[in-house]
Image (tube, rainbow, N blue to C red):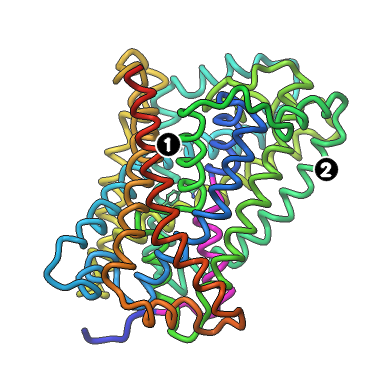
Amino acid sequence: MSQPREQWGTRLGFVLAAAGSAIGLGAVWRLPYVAGTSGGGAFFLIFIAFTLILGTALLIAEFVVGRRTQKPPVPAYKTIAPNTPWFFNGIMGMICAILILSFYSVVGGWIIIYFVRSLGGLASGGTDYEALFGSIISNPWEVGIAHLAFMLITILVVQGGVRKGIERTTNWMMPALFILFIVIVIRSLTLEGAGEGIAFFLQPDFSAVTGTTILFALGQAFFSLSLGNSVMATYSSYLPKEKSLINSAFSIVVLTIIISLLSGLAIFPGVFAFDIPPDAGPNLIFIVLPAVFEQLALGSLFFTLFMLLLVFATLTSAFSLLEIIVSSVSYKRPDSRGRTAWIVGILIFILGIPSNLSYGLLSDWLIFGNTFFDSIDILTSNFLLPLGALIVSLFLPLKMKKADLRDEVMRGSAMGNGLFLVWFTVIRYIAPVAIIIVFINSLIGLFT
Ligand code: PFF
């Protein structure tokens, strides 16, 4: 290779980019509606437990694969375990990233539409927002153009490279997102009737928990942390050897949990204050938020700010989904990054068109009772991501020496060896057993 491979400028730059990948539609759009359909507070608690225990450990595991080899997933697996089929997990991760980005960019497009429309005052007047959402997303031209615009921004940033494109952009988008979020939550919590929503979100009712709830909470934990498809392995492959993996992982998990909590607090008070069924589905935030903001002084301005926040959150996750593919395809020829980003980005856009039409022209096209859009979401989040994570947790203890793992995990961190042993135990025993049990449990649920 002619020029040396790029690296993140600073550890904070890496943490913000990885937190940017983690924090996105998962926390702000998916969590509230999945919690809404799967039992509220109990779901949220199970999700937090999975995120803290399995999520942190598996995030570190993915970091080990990337940082140790400084290569994209497929060559990374081949370097750690030459002449074995484990590299297949890298291929599956790429396929999964392509599928996720195909529907993620569709929702990114919806958000752009709401942002642009809000500039003209979407949140004023007694509109029926459910009907408005329906009419917006069933207009193929408007959603098509917005979907394309979202993809073009993603391509332009990823084309710029890891440091000049992704790091430079996430370095200002993420702090902006945190500030906007805090402003919005304060607004929401001061709504009359906010208490009922907070209770739904935070008070666990375990009688509503089924095997499917647990599977969805597991899927949500993996989706939220961008785990199981080697995206985090790819980001960590640009991390210099001396930087601490464990400290970075903790920062990312904590930031993701805080934002997930804040999104629930931003959204559920409004759901209850305005009598919107909490299980409204993927369109929940598009119906609830305009209705909430409409009631507030300067509501239109705050709605625009929230949509801007969502655009940032969605873009910073989309960068990572495109980066794993671009990094892999242009690995041997770094000068082809720009071209690769364009070709791959446009192909993923085309693949996303059926998802985009799922709520309009193709709404009758159901797979096992789900729209094309929901089917891809469920396939990736609930099956491919946990499967990918399961494979990483089997892979590392089998294919790397314990001493090498300890060196990679603990380097640069002042924490004691005990923590390494906890991590090793979770990866070696708890994570695989937990994932397999959840899988079996939900399979039994499917057939009974
Ligand atoms: N973590 C992102 C979110 O919560 O919105 C979604 C995501 C990004 C999933 C990247 C998987 C991934 F590889």
Q: Is residue 170 shown above or below 345?
A: below
Q: Residue at x 44, y 30 (%)?
A: 143
Q: Residue at x 35, y 22 (%)?
A: 446
The spot of residue 42 in percent (x, y) is: 64, 33
Q: Are marks 1 and 2 in contact (CB under 8 Å)?
A: no
Q: Between residue 351 and residue 400, name the one nearer to us.
A: 400
Instruction: Return the residue nearer the eye: 448 or 315.
Output: 448
Q: Secondary structure at mark 1?
A: helix
- Count neighbours of disc 1 (C-alpha within 10 A) and say few if under 14, some if 14 to 19, many if 20 or more: many
Is 215 a magenta residue? no
1 or 2: tag closer to the N-terminus: 1
Q: Quadrant of the N terminus?
A: bottom left
Q: Residue furthest left?
A: 83
Answer yes or no: is residue 416 visible. Answer: yes
Percent across and percent down for residue 234 are: 37, 66
- Residue 14 inside the magenta-drawn segment: yes
Q: Looking at the picture, does residue 381 appear above or below residue 354?
A: below
Task: Identify which residue, 286 or 94, lies in the foreground.
Answer: 94
- Residue 106's disc is 1
- Does ligand 1 reach within 8 Å of label 1's beta carbon? no
The amino acid beneath tag 2 is Ile
Q: What's under tag 1, amino acid-wise?
A: Val
Q: Quadrant of residue 235?
A: bottom left
| Labelled disc at residue 233 | none
Depth check, mark 1 against mark 2: the one in front is 2
Image quadrant assignment for residue 361? top left
Region in magenta: 7-24
Q: Mark on residue 186?
A: 2
12 vs 85, left or right, is: right
Task: Decide whether the magenta segment is chiefly helix, strand or loop.
Answer: helix
The secondary element bearing badge 2 is classed as helix
* Residue at 16% over, 73% down: 82
